Amino acid sequence: MAPKDKYTVILPTYNERRNLPIIVWLLNSTFTENIPYLSTFETFNPTHSDPPSAPNSNLDYEIIIVDDASPDGTLEIATQLQRLYTPQRILLRPRPGKLGLGTAYVHGLRSATGTFVIIMDADFSHHPKFIPQFIAVQKRTNCDIVTGTRYSGAGAGVYGWDLKRKMVSRGANLVADTVLRPGVSDLTGSFRLYRREVLEKVMGRTQSKGYTFQMELMTRAKAMGCRVEECPITFVDRVYGESKLGGEEIVEYLKVSEKQSAQSDGIEREDSRLTQSREF
Protein backbone atom coordinates (compact mmCIF):
# COMPACT_ATOMS: atom_id res chain seq x y z
CA MET A 1 0.00 0.00 0.00
CA ALA A 2 1.30 3.46 -0.91
CA PRO A 3 2.17 5.71 2.04
CA LYS A 4 -0.51 8.18 3.07
CA ASP A 5 -0.05 11.72 1.83
CA LYS A 6 0.70 14.46 4.32
CA TYR A 7 0.09 18.16 3.74
CA THR A 8 2.34 20.92 5.04
CA VAL A 9 0.92 24.46 5.16
CA ILE A 10 3.52 27.24 5.38
CA LEU A 11 2.11 30.45 6.88
CA PRO A 12 4.42 33.50 6.84
CA THR A 13 3.14 36.05 9.35
CA TYR A 14 3.77 39.67 10.26
CA ASN A 15 1.27 41.43 12.52
CA GLU A 16 -1.39 38.72 12.15
CA ARG A 17 -2.32 38.44 15.84
CA ARG A 18 -6.05 38.69 15.20
CA ASN A 19 -6.10 36.63 12.00
CA LEU A 20 -3.92 33.71 13.07
CA PRO A 21 -6.26 31.91 15.53
CA ILE A 22 -9.10 31.89 13.01
CA ILE A 23 -7.05 30.78 10.02
CA VAL A 24 -5.50 27.95 12.05
CA TRP A 25 -8.94 26.84 13.23
CA LEU A 26 -10.20 26.88 9.63
CA LEU A 27 -7.20 24.87 8.45
CA ASN A 28 -7.67 22.29 11.17
CA SER A 29 -11.37 22.00 10.34
CA THR A 30 -10.58 21.71 6.64
CA PHE A 31 -8.18 18.81 7.10
CA THR A 32 -10.20 16.97 9.73
CA GLU A 33 -13.82 17.63 8.80
CA ASN A 34 -14.18 18.94 5.28
CA ILE A 35 -12.45 16.72 2.71
CA PRO A 36 -15.30 15.32 0.60
CA TYR A 37 -13.45 14.91 -2.70
CA LEU A 38 -10.98 12.08 -2.24
CA SER A 39 -13.13 9.14 -3.32
CA THR A 40 -14.59 10.94 -6.34
CA PHE A 41 -11.67 12.99 -7.61
CA GLU A 42 -11.70 11.22 -10.97
CA THR A 43 -14.88 13.03 -12.02
CA PHE A 44 -14.35 16.35 -10.23
CA ASN A 45 -13.46 19.29 -12.47
CA PRO A 46 -13.62 22.55 -10.48
CA THR A 47 -13.71 24.70 -13.63
CA HIS A 48 -16.97 23.18 -14.86
CA SER A 49 -18.98 21.72 -12.00
CA ASP A 50 -19.77 21.98 -8.34
CA PRO A 51 -17.77 19.82 -5.91
CA PRO A 52 -19.26 16.34 -5.49
CA SER A 53 -20.61 14.99 -2.25
CA ALA A 54 -18.79 12.09 -0.56
CA PRO A 55 -18.02 10.84 2.94
CA ASN A 56 -15.54 12.98 4.86
CA SER A 57 -11.97 11.75 5.22
CA ASN A 58 -9.34 13.15 7.58
CA LEU A 59 -5.95 14.07 6.21
CA ASP A 60 -2.56 14.22 7.90
CA TYR A 61 -1.27 17.77 8.10
CA GLU A 62 1.08 20.22 9.79
CA ILE A 63 1.15 24.03 9.86
CA ILE A 64 4.50 25.81 9.89
CA ILE A 65 4.24 29.40 11.15
CA VAL A 66 7.13 31.64 10.11
CA ASP A 67 6.80 34.88 12.06
CA ASP A 68 9.14 37.78 11.34
CA ALA A 69 9.29 39.32 14.82
CA SER A 70 5.81 40.82 14.64
CA PRO A 71 5.52 43.73 17.10
CA ASP A 72 1.83 42.98 17.72
CA GLY A 73 2.53 39.70 19.55
CA THR A 74 1.72 37.27 16.74
CA LEU A 75 4.36 34.82 17.99
CA GLU A 76 2.79 34.71 21.45
CA ILE A 77 -0.56 33.80 19.88
CA ALA A 78 1.18 31.17 17.74
CA THR A 79 2.71 29.66 20.89
CA GLN A 80 -0.73 29.38 22.48
CA LEU A 81 -2.06 27.73 19.32
CA GLN A 82 0.79 25.24 19.41
CA ARG A 83 -0.19 24.23 22.95
CA LEU A 84 -3.82 23.89 21.85
CA TYR A 85 -3.29 21.89 18.65
CA THR A 86 -0.02 20.14 19.74
CA PRO A 87 3.54 20.65 18.44
CA GLN A 88 2.96 17.85 15.93
CA ARG A 89 0.39 20.02 14.16
CA ILE A 90 1.79 23.51 14.76
CA LEU A 91 5.50 24.15 14.17
CA LEU A 92 6.96 27.53 15.05
CA ARG A 93 9.90 28.78 13.01
CA PRO A 94 10.28 32.46 14.00
CA ARG A 95 12.90 34.79 12.51
CA PRO A 96 14.57 37.87 14.02
CA GLY A 97 13.03 40.39 11.60
CA LYS A 98 11.41 41.03 8.22
CA LEU A 99 13.65 39.17 5.79
CA GLY A 100 11.35 38.82 2.79
CA LEU A 101 8.38 36.65 1.87
CA GLY A 102 10.41 34.36 -0.37
CA THR A 103 12.96 33.55 2.30
CA ALA A 104 10.11 32.89 4.74
CA TYR A 105 8.91 30.08 2.49
CA VAL A 106 12.46 28.74 2.15
CA HIS A 107 12.86 28.87 5.93
CA GLY A 108 9.58 27.03 6.51
CA LEU A 109 10.26 24.43 3.84
CA ARG A 110 13.37 23.25 5.71
CA SER A 111 11.08 21.88 8.44
CA ALA A 112 8.37 20.48 6.18
CA THR A 113 7.66 16.76 6.39
CA GLY A 114 4.62 16.62 4.10
CA THR A 115 4.53 15.00 0.69
CA PHE A 116 2.77 18.14 -0.51
CA VAL A 117 3.29 21.76 0.54
CA ILE A 118 0.60 24.45 0.50
CA ILE A 119 1.68 28.07 0.52
CA MET A 120 -0.89 30.71 1.36
CA ASP A 121 -1.50 33.96 3.22
CA ALA A 122 -2.65 34.11 6.83
CA ASP A 123 -5.04 37.04 6.39
CA PHE A 124 -8.09 35.22 4.90
CA SER A 125 -7.42 36.45 1.37
CA HIS A 126 -6.80 32.73 0.72
CA HIS A 127 -9.62 30.74 2.27
CA PRO A 128 -8.84 27.16 3.36
CA LYS A 129 -12.15 26.00 1.85
CA PHE A 130 -10.38 25.77 -1.52
CA ILE A 131 -7.74 23.33 -0.28
CA PRO A 132 -9.96 20.24 -0.83
CA GLN A 133 -10.44 21.37 -4.42
CA PHE A 134 -6.67 21.80 -4.86
CA ILE A 135 -6.17 18.26 -3.54
CA ALA A 136 -8.88 16.90 -5.82
CA VAL A 137 -7.30 18.53 -8.89
CA GLN A 138 -3.90 17.10 -7.99
CA LYS A 139 -5.31 13.63 -7.45
CA ARG A 140 -7.27 13.72 -10.68
CA THR A 141 -4.41 14.99 -12.87
CA ASN A 142 -1.32 13.79 -10.97
CA CYS A 143 0.22 17.22 -11.57
CA ASP A 144 3.19 18.74 -9.75
CA ILE A 145 1.59 22.09 -8.89
CA VAL A 146 -1.97 23.34 -8.40
CA THR A 147 -2.21 27.11 -8.51
CA GLY A 148 -5.25 29.13 -7.49
CA THR A 149 -6.50 31.57 -10.09
CA ARG A 150 -8.62 34.65 -9.54
CA TYR A 151 -9.10 35.23 -13.27
CA SER A 152 -10.18 31.98 -14.92
CA GLY A 153 -12.88 29.37 -14.36
CA ALA A 154 -16.33 29.26 -12.81
CA GLY A 155 -16.51 31.12 -9.52
CA ALA A 156 -13.13 32.86 -9.76
CA GLY A 157 -13.01 36.48 -8.67
CA VAL A 158 -11.63 39.26 -6.47
CA TYR A 159 -13.60 40.98 -3.70
CA GLY A 160 -12.83 43.96 -1.49
CA TRP A 161 -10.41 45.73 -3.85
CA ASP A 162 -10.98 49.17 -5.30
CA LEU A 163 -10.76 49.74 -9.06
CA LYS A 164 -7.16 50.96 -8.87
CA ARG A 165 -5.85 47.82 -7.21
CA LYS A 166 -7.82 45.57 -9.54
CA MET A 167 -6.27 47.38 -12.50
CA VAL A 168 -2.78 47.03 -11.00
CA SER A 169 -3.31 43.30 -10.51
CA ARG A 170 -4.69 42.66 -13.98
CA GLY A 171 -2.01 44.90 -15.48
CA ALA A 172 0.75 42.99 -13.68
CA ASN A 173 -0.61 39.70 -14.99
CA LEU A 174 -0.92 41.13 -18.49
CA VAL A 175 2.72 42.25 -18.40
CA ALA A 176 3.78 38.83 -17.14
CA ASP A 177 1.73 37.00 -19.76
CA THR A 178 3.16 39.15 -22.55
CA VAL A 179 6.78 39.09 -21.43
CA LEU A 180 7.16 35.69 -19.79
CA ARG A 181 4.40 33.60 -21.42
CA PRO A 182 4.00 31.49 -18.25
CA GLY A 183 0.98 29.52 -19.38
CA VAL A 184 -1.10 30.34 -16.28
CA SER A 185 -3.83 32.94 -15.90
CA ASP A 186 -2.76 34.31 -12.48
CA LEU A 187 1.02 34.43 -12.24
CA THR A 188 1.02 36.93 -9.38
CA GLY A 189 -1.27 34.81 -7.20
CA SER A 190 0.22 33.14 -4.14
CA PHE A 191 -2.16 30.33 -3.15
CA ARG A 192 -0.66 27.06 -4.38
CA LEU A 193 -0.09 23.37 -3.71
CA TYR A 194 3.27 21.80 -4.65
CA ARG A 195 4.81 18.37 -4.52
CA ARG A 196 7.46 18.92 -1.88
CA GLU A 197 10.36 17.58 -3.96
CA VAL A 198 9.35 19.83 -6.86
CA LEU A 199 9.13 22.90 -4.63
CA GLU A 200 12.54 22.16 -3.12
CA LYS A 201 14.13 21.89 -6.54
CA VAL A 202 12.49 25.02 -7.96
CA MET A 203 13.22 27.06 -4.83
CA GLY A 204 16.87 26.15 -5.18
CA ARG A 205 16.96 28.13 -8.42
CA THR A 206 14.78 31.06 -7.42
CA GLN A 207 16.51 34.36 -6.63
CA SER A 208 13.71 36.74 -5.61
CA LYS A 209 13.11 37.40 -1.92
CA GLY A 210 9.98 39.55 -1.75
CA TYR A 211 6.49 39.46 -3.24
CA THR A 212 7.84 38.57 -6.70
CA PHE A 213 9.08 35.25 -5.32
CA GLN A 214 5.86 33.47 -6.30
CA MET A 215 6.03 34.80 -9.84
CA GLU A 216 9.59 33.58 -10.31
CA LEU A 217 8.74 30.21 -8.74
CA MET A 218 6.05 29.57 -11.33
CA THR A 219 8.10 30.84 -14.26
CA ARG A 220 11.01 28.59 -13.36
CA ALA A 221 8.75 25.61 -12.61
CA LYS A 222 7.20 25.84 -16.07
CA ALA A 223 10.65 26.20 -17.68
CA MET A 224 11.82 23.09 -15.81
CA GLY A 225 8.96 21.05 -17.25
CA CYS A 226 6.75 20.82 -14.17
CA ARG A 227 3.10 20.05 -14.81
CA VAL A 228 0.80 22.81 -13.56
CA GLU A 229 -2.98 22.83 -13.19
CA GLU A 230 -5.24 25.72 -12.17
CA CYS A 231 -8.14 25.84 -9.71
CA PRO A 232 -10.56 28.81 -9.55
CA ILE A 233 -10.60 30.68 -6.24
CA THR A 234 -12.23 33.78 -4.82
CA PHE A 235 -9.77 36.26 -3.37
CA VAL A 236 -11.01 38.48 -0.55
CA ASP A 237 -9.01 41.44 0.77
CA ARG A 238 -7.58 40.99 4.26
CA VAL A 239 -9.97 41.15 7.21
CA TYR A 240 -7.62 42.65 9.83
CA GLY A 241 -4.40 44.62 9.45
CA GLU A 242 -2.88 46.44 6.50
CA SER A 243 -1.67 45.18 3.15
CA LYS A 244 2.09 44.71 2.96
CA LEU A 245 2.19 45.33 -0.79
CA GLY A 246 3.65 48.70 -1.68
CA GLY A 247 5.45 50.64 -4.37
CA GLU A 248 8.76 48.89 -3.75
CA GLU A 249 7.19 45.52 -4.52
CA ILE A 250 5.73 46.87 -7.78
CA VAL A 251 9.18 48.08 -8.84
CA GLU A 252 10.72 44.74 -7.88
CA TYR A 253 8.05 42.95 -9.90
CA LEU A 254 8.91 44.92 -13.04
CA LYS A 255 12.64 44.31 -12.56
CA VAL A 256 12.17 40.59 -12.08
CA SER A 257 9.85 40.39 -15.11
CA GLU A 258 12.53 41.99 -17.26
CA LYS A 259 15.25 39.75 -15.83
CA GLN A 260 13.21 36.59 -16.22
CA SER A 261 12.39 37.49 -19.81
CA ALA A 262 16.07 37.89 -20.59
CA GLN A 263 16.89 34.54 -19.00
CA SER A 264 13.95 32.52 -20.29
CA ASP A 265 15.60 31.49 -23.55
CA GLY A 266 18.63 30.24 -21.65
CA ILE A 267 16.81 28.03 -19.16
CA GLU A 268 17.07 24.41 -20.19
CA ARG A 269 14.18 22.10 -19.49
CA GLU A 270 14.84 19.61 -16.74
CA ASP A 271 14.77 15.89 -17.37
CA SER A 272 11.20 14.54 -17.39
CA ARG A 273 12.10 12.36 -14.41
CA LEU A 274 11.28 15.36 -12.18
CA THR A 275 7.60 15.07 -12.99
CA GLN A 276 7.57 11.28 -13.21
CA SER A 277 9.14 10.66 -9.79
CA ARG A 278 6.17 10.66 -7.86
CA GLU A 279 -0.01 38.80 -4.84
CA PHE A 280 -0.56 41.32 -6.89
Image: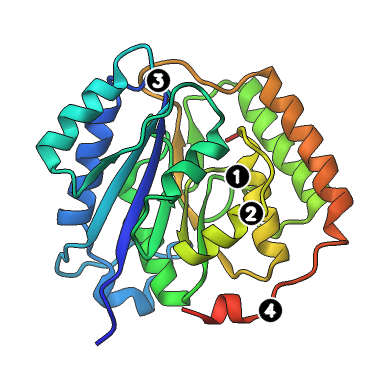
Which of marks 4 and 3 precedes in the sequence? Answer: 3
Q: For the C terminus, which image quadrant?
A: top right
Report the mark closest to the observer, 1 or 4.
4
Q: Which residue is mark 1?
A: 214
Which of the pair 238/117 is nearer the observer? 117
Which SS class for mark 2? helix
Spatial CA distance of label 2 from label 4 is 17 Å
| Disc 4 crowd, CA 10 A, few/some/many (<14, 14-19, 20+) | few
Specify whether residue 230 is in view.
no
Left or right placement of residue 256 versus residue 38 in this view: right
Which of the pair 119/164 is nearer the observer? 119
**Residue 202 placement (x, y as % from top left):** 61, 58
Is label 2 in contact with label 4 (beta carbons under 8 Å)?
Answer: no
Spatial CA distance of label 3 from label 4 is 40 Å
Q: Which residue is mark 2?
A: 218
Q: Which residue is mark 3?
A: 69
Specify whether residue 268 is in view.
yes
Which of marks 4 and 1 precedes in the sequence? Answer: 1
Is label 3 in contact with label 4 (beta carbons under 8 Å)?
Answer: no
Left or right placement of residue 194 versus residue 71 in this view: right
Spatial CA distance of label 3 from label 2 is 28 Å
Q: Residue at x 27, y 51 (%)?
A: 62
The amino acid type, in three-letter code, at marker 1 is: Gln
Is 18 above or below relative to 94? above
